[in-house]
């Protein structure tokens, strides 16, 4: 009774303190740690005998699947015998005694199928023919071992071990134990067996440092190192068991290639040739005699060196550099080195010499025009200049030719081509379009010396004054041309003509040939009646000091007057239209000429005539070269008389303001006319007077006031 009380107290203590219960029994290991459902397993640990005193309950689980209690029991304080239950999954084993805490194994128990299971194999690598021992379970149903898919030789299975030989043709990879139950029960190892590698060749047998090549062979899996004649490659990748992609390392030299795998190091039977490689040179430009240093890789064994195609002397040959002297006759081009291991070129990295400009076509042009420049060593050109102004654009065609676009504001002068090694300038000049900014003096007589200022005046071949060519022409410099006013020149712009075209001045040069031509215009009578003749008298005079050549008169008549006749004291008239044109020819100083023009007005009102005159000589007083005149045209002085209701209605045109109405009782002399004092009424443009008739004879007339 006392024992039971203590046991109950212990149980209560265990419930209150799970750590105390856990300490009563624990699991240390499972033997074996692998098994299939139905396999016997021993769970090792301590405190398992608690179930025996007093008898109690025992629960064993594989992960979360309980073992059959009828196949489970405690065989010792440190040992439980059980069987892997159906449906068990990989995980820890668990033990619970008398409903106490659950003890958990520190390692998982691996649940396997009925097929073979490999836990280990040795050795881990070797060549074909090597005997390999596999440890594991369920080997009684094993039918063979595959080395990465290739069947092994001399297969010898036992319950928990297999011995087999590595077959010929096998390559590194996992081992697969085949099961008589079918492929679904085959077991493949997670780790690889490494077969000694072989090298059968390369994707190319020669290449420069930095190139990528492919090493071809077998069993390259997990390769850890690639050596080029002893120099380790920094960058490589195992593409598959038969290919390694590798970058040829710096300092690599010609020789065999070694590959190291977990199964050892293998060396190629063939030699790989490391070609030379040029990485740069300094300086990158210069003239003949310049010392340069060519840098690169594997430059040993130099037999020749060329710069731009010309053979150069070389010295101080090292793995990474070679010294050279720029030869005479060199042109822009790559550097080429020939060694016992092959040839290397700098490719598009060129050595430059100063460009030379020999010619260009055309030799003149306007902005945006395209020209072709010929010479040598144009490759790498950095700019083209027209007398110092950068071209609007250029294109290098080849080493001896380029095209350029004439820039805005081009100035006549040489063309230069700039390159990495310097600048070449033409001996000849390119002519830009000329322009005139000013000239001095701005007026003068024939023979006057004139200086013309502007831009691009070099090469000017002719100067014209309003179309008349001047001689001689002296080009002082690009900004000045001197000449003299030619005979017969007239006032107008100055024109300069050069290789790239011609241009006119914006202002005119005034020829000092003065002739003061004047014009006066008169018309009579004024006023004039409709239908009567009106005579215009136009007088043209020349006050000098020189005779006025080619005097022209323009006479514009009123639109309501008909031309009756026209005449001139000299020259000729053109009266076919309006205005009337007269060519009076030359009027000497102090001389004059007169035009007489007769017209007949057809409507009343005020009419205007104008006339102007001038010559080809300068006139210093244009104010007297034109005049206009107004003439009053009156309607005919006709009256109308209407008798109505013994009242005489007398009417005449209202425009006859200086006419008065008179009346007389007889026309027989001596008649007596008297003024009608009745103030006229104005009706519809007529003066209207109402005069009672009283049945007496009466005559009426209009009389013009003095």
Image (cartoon, helix red, strand yellow):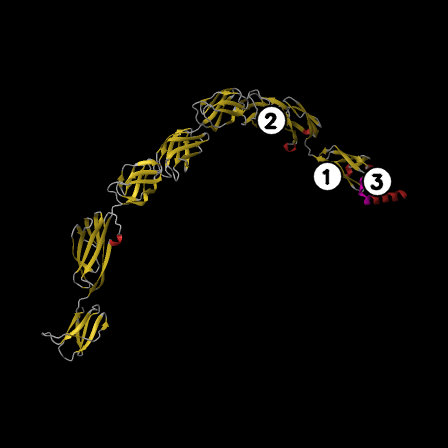
* Residue 81, x across and y down, in percent: 78, 35
* Residue 179, x across and y down, in percent: 66, 30
C-alpha gap between disc 2 and disc 1? 41 Å
Q: Is any atom of residue 167 visible in this view?
A: no
Image quarter of residue 157: top right
Q: Tell me the residue that label 1 is attached to.
A: 63
Q: Which mark is residue 55?
A: 3
Q: Residues within 10 Å of mark 3 (few under 14, many from 20)?
A: few
Q: Secondary structure at mark 3?
A: loop
Question: Which residue sits furthest right?
Answer: 2
Q: Tell me the residue that label 2 is attached to.
A: 220
Q: Which mark is residue 115?
A: none
C-alpha gap between disc 2 and disc 3? 63 Å
Q: Residues within 10 Å of mark 1 (few under 14, many from 20)?
A: some
Q: Is residue 19 magenta?
A: yes
Part of the protein shown in magenta: 14-22
């Amino acid at each position: 009774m006392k024992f039971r009380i203590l046991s109950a107290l212990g149980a209560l203590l265990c419930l209150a303190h799970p750590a105390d219960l856990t300490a009563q029994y624990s699991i240390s290991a499972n033997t074996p740690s692998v098994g299939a459902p139905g396999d016997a397993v021993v769970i090792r640990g301590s405190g398992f005998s608690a179930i025996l005193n007093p008898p109690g309950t025992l629960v064993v689980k594989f992960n979360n699947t309980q073992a059959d209690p009828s196949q489970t029991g405690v065989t010792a304080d440190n040992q439980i015998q059980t069987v892997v239950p159906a449906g068990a999954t990989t995980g820890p084993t668990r033990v619970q005694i008398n409903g106490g805490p659950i003890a958990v194994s520190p390692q998982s128990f691996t649940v396997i199928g009925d097929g073979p299971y490999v836990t280990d194999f040795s050795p881990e690598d070797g060549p074909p023919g090597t005997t390999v021992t596999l440890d594991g379970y369920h080997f009684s149903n094993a039918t063979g071992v595959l080395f990465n898919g290739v069947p092994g030789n001399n297969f010898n299975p036992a319950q928990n071990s297999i011995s087999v030989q590595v077959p010929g043709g096998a390559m590194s990879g996992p081992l697969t134990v085949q099961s008589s139950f079918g492929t679904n029960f085959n077991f493949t190892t997670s780790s690889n067996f490494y077969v000694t590698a072989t090298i059968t060749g390369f994707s190319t047998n020669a290449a420069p440092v930095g190139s990528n090549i492919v090493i071809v062979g077998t069993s390259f899996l997990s390769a850890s190192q690639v050596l080029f004649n002893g120099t380790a490659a920094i960058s490589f990748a195992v593409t598959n068991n038969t290919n390694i992609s590798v970058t040829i390392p710096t300092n690599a030299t010609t020789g065999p290639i070694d590959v190291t795998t977990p199964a050892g190091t293998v060396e190629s039977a063939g030699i790989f040739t490391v070609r030379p490689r040029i990485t740069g040179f300094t300086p990158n430009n210069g003239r003949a005699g310049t010392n340069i240093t060519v840098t690169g890789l594997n430059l040993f064994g130099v037999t020749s060196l060329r710069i731009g195609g010309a053979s150069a002397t070389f010295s101080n040959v090292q793995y990474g550099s070679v010294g050279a002297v720029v030869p005479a006759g060199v042109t822009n081009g790559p550097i080429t080195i020939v060694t016992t291991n092959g040839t290397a070129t700098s490719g598009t990295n060129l050595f430059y010499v100063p460009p030379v400009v020999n010619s260009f076509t055309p030799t003149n042009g306007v902005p945006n025009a395209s020209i072709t420049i010929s010479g040598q060593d144009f490759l790498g050109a950095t700019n083209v200049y027209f007398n110092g102004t950068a071209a609007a654009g250029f294109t290098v065609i080849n080493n001896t030719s380029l095209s350029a676009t004439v820039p805005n504001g081009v100035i006549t002068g040489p063309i230069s081509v700039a390159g990495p090694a310097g600048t070449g300038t033409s001996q000849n000049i390119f002519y830009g379009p000329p322009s005139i900014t000013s000239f001095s003096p701005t007026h003068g007589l024939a023979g006057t010396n004139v200086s013309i200022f502007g831009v691009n005046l070099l090469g000017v071949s002719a100067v014209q004054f309003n179309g008349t060519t001047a001689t001689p022409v002296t080009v002082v410099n690009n900004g000045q041309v001197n000449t003299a006013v030619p005979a017969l020149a007239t006032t107008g712009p100055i024109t300069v003509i050069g290789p790239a075209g011609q241009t006119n001045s914006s202002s005119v040069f005034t020829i000092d040939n003065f002739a003061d031509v004047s014009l006066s215009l008169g018309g009579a009578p004024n006023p004039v009646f409709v239908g009567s003749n009106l005579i215009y008298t136009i007088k043209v005079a020349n006050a000098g000091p020189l005779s006025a050549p080619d005097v022209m008169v323009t006479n514009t008549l009123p639109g309501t007057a008909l031309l009756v006749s026209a005449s001139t004291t000299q020259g000729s008239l053109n009266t076919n239209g309006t205005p009337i044109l007269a060519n009076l020819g030359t009027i000497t100083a102090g001389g004059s000429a007169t035009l007489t023009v007769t017209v007949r007005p057809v409507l009343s009102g005020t009419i205007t005539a104008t006339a102007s005159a001038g010559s080809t000589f300068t006139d210093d007083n244009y104010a007297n070269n034109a005049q206009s005149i107004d003439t009053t045209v009156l309607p005919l002085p006709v009256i109308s008389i209407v008798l109505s209701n013994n009242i005489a209605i007398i009417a005449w045109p209202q425009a006859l303001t200086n006419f008065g109405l008179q009346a007389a009782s007889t026309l027989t002399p001596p008649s007596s006319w008297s003024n009608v004092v009745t103030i006229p009424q104005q009706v519809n443009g007529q003066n209207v007077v109402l005069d009672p008739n009283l049945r007496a004879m009466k005559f009426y007339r209009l009389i013009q006031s003095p």
